[in-house]
Structures are given as structure tokens and as C-alpha cells.
Image (cartoon, rainbow, N blue to C red):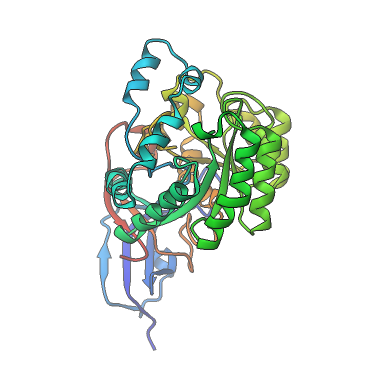
Amino acid sequence: MAERFDRIWHNARLATLRGDLPDAGVIERGLVALRDGRIAFVGAQSDFPGNADAAERVDCEGRWITPGLIDCHTHLVYSGNRAHEFELRLQGASYEEIARAGGGIVSTVAATRSASEAELVASALPRLDALIAEGVTTLEVKSGYGLNTATEMRQLSAARTLGRNRPVTIRTTFLGAHALPPEAQGDKDRYIGLVCEEMLPAVAKAGLADAVDAFMEGIAFSGEQTARVFCAAKTLGLPVKLHADQLSNLGGAALAAQFSALSADHLEHTDAAGVAAMARAGTVAVLLPGAFYFIRETNKPPVELLREHRVNIALATDSNPGSSPLTSLLLAMNMGATLFRMTVAECLAGATREAARALGILGEAGTLEAGKWCDLAIWDIERPAELVYRIGFNPLHRRVWRGQ
């Protein structure tokens, strides 16, 4: 009896991302078959059963198919913008100076606290649509602009609503330890107690978070305070990730590794000991060139060290109002290559396979493999390098999410 599929995409060139770099698992004359929202077959057209039946056949006419893109670090849900602070930075003010003067994250907190969930969803949808239009099928959304229980939960609920309003997979991350709210009056330890004892249990009970994050930095929280948050997260069975070593080296990468974090993100000031610890723990390095560019950082993440220690490297937009108002993962890939000297293959893997690994969902997404969700990006390109090479040009032909 002939095997039956819901749909097949044939006459395609595949970058499966299954193979080791740099070839990215390329199949020149490839075929992808769908059944019940998942990939049922992926491989050479010549290996596909000749008597197989499909409800629909799509001729890709030689186009390239990659896994759907994954943006594994965003702060997509917030209210307002920080264009005024951008002007101040152009006049010479630093990111830290603006934060200490009451701007920065805290200014977005005020706007977000005053917004309803419906307003948060409405303001985030255009940003989400921009990512979807470039082939993004999965993205992470963090909270962190509420800094009180009600608003943090409203942010996370809004993020989940985005996933119901659009054909996209949303992973949510609780980032209560993002900054100190004004009402804390400078008492970081007391606020971290609130995060651990009130906010995090409420978020976990409501099932609103897939992971827990923190901002470990001089203008944010210490290693000891971050460890308290991570211990509370582990008690509740939630994996952790960390904004680490962005503005200084406080040992964030090593702390993330100590807690077997899914990822350590930014890493501009990470040292060799931090990289080695990440390698031992299997923690993914998430590089965020949009923030590096936007705040005019000069210290680059240690890409060569990450390669030497075989740390998996992901790329993301860090889409947020203050330090990376970026809604193009394709541009983030170009920045990863031009600013950090990542290879084309590293950038492609960074926005697919390694991004999935950084979210803990590599078993479901990130590569073209039988059994995974059928999340595809079909491109009008001659070679995959075009996805990294072009600036401000979108060659997406069609996006497929869970087979649709």
C-alpha cells in the first residue's frame, strides 16, 4: 500500500542544518514531506518512495529550504519607545549614565505598567509581523518591564496571546530580575526576595514561563543575587538563562554554567574561564550584535575562544526598546558576520539549530529532520550565503509553520 502524506515540497535544495559546519547538511535535489504538522520525510528526491501519495505537491522550482528561523532572545512585549534616549546617546551619554539618571529599563517599566494586556499585544504585533515576514517560525519573548507581579504576569500573558493571534511558536521567559523598580528605593536584596518569594511562584503556578532569566551587571544584579533567583527557578523546575558579561566581566558566563543554564547571552566581556565553564556545562552562547551595534560597544564577544572550546553559538535580535530596537533576524545574521566575523554557516546555524538549542527545543525544531515540526523557510536565493550577505532585502518566498 502506498504511503500517504499531507503535502510534499519537491525540486528543492535543502540546508537541513543536520550536518557539521560548514556544509550545513546540504541536499541539492531534495524533498520534504509533511504528515500531521510534522516532517515525515526529508532527504534526496531519489530516496523518496516512488509510489508515495500526497494530497498536495509543491514544486519549489529549485528554491532553497531551510528550517524556519528562530529568534531566541527578544523583549518583544513592552509599551512606549526610547527614541529620546537614543538622541542623548548621540550627544555622548552612555547606556549606564542614562540608566542611573532614571532612564533606561525603568522608563519602559513606567509605560508598560500603564498599558493593558490588549494594548501590549497590539503594540507588539507589528514587531512580531516583521519577524514572521522574514521566515521566523519560533521566538522567545521575555518579561522584565513590569518589575511587579501583576505587570510581569501581564507581559507574559500578552506574549502567549501573540502566539494565539499568529501562526508562530512563542517561548516565554520570566525576567523579573531585569532592573530595580523605583519603589524598591535602592534595596536590591529586598527586591530579589520579592522576585524569588512572590513573583516567580505566581508565574510558575500560572504556567506562564518556559524559563527564567536575569540581568547580572553592575547596573542590575550581583552574582549572589542572580544565584538566589536561579535557585528559586530550579526549585520550581524551570530552566535558566542569563544576560551575562554585557558591560563588564562579573563572571556571568561561569555562573550561568554553574546552574547548567540553557544559554548565556551577550558575552562581550566574557573571559577564557567563563567560556571553558560554558563548554563543560553545554550552555549555548547567544550573541546579540544588534545591541553591540546600537550602544556602540567596542569589546567583541570572544568568538574565537567559543570556537576553540566548541561552545555552540546562537544569534538573536535582542529586540527591545532601549539597546536593540531591531526586528530583523536577517540583519542580525549580517551583523554577526560583519561585526563578529562569524562565518555564513555559523550565522545560519545560529538562527536555526543553535537558537533551538538555546531555548531547549532542539528535539522539536531548528533542523530539517523527520519527527520535528514542519517549520520551513523557502527562499528565492541561489546560495545560502545570500541570507547573510544582503542588508535590508528579504528573499523569503514562503514560510511554513507546522505544515501550514
Q: Residue at x 74, y 31 (%)?
A: 273
Q: Locate residue 154, reporting x and y percent.
A: 41, 51
Residue closer to the observer: 88 or 333:
88
- Residue 299 visible in the displayed image: yes
Question: Compared with residue 60, is residue 219 higher up or lower down, i.e. above or below?
Answer: above
**Residue at the image point whose x is 46% and y is 30% from the top:** 289
Q: Is residue 309 visible?
A: no
358 lies left or right of 281: left
Q: Is residue 343 toward the left or the right of residue 237 in the image?
A: left
Instruction: Report how many numbered discs are placed on residues in the image.
Output: 0
What is the quadrant of residue 263 in the picture?
Answer: top right
Residue nearest the viewer, comparing 11 with 164 = 164
Please say if 343 is above or below 119.
above
Query: Which image quarter is the C terminus in?
Result: bottom left
Q: Position of residue 207 (x, y in %)?
A: 51, 62
- Which residue is nearer to you in this view: 244 or 8? 244
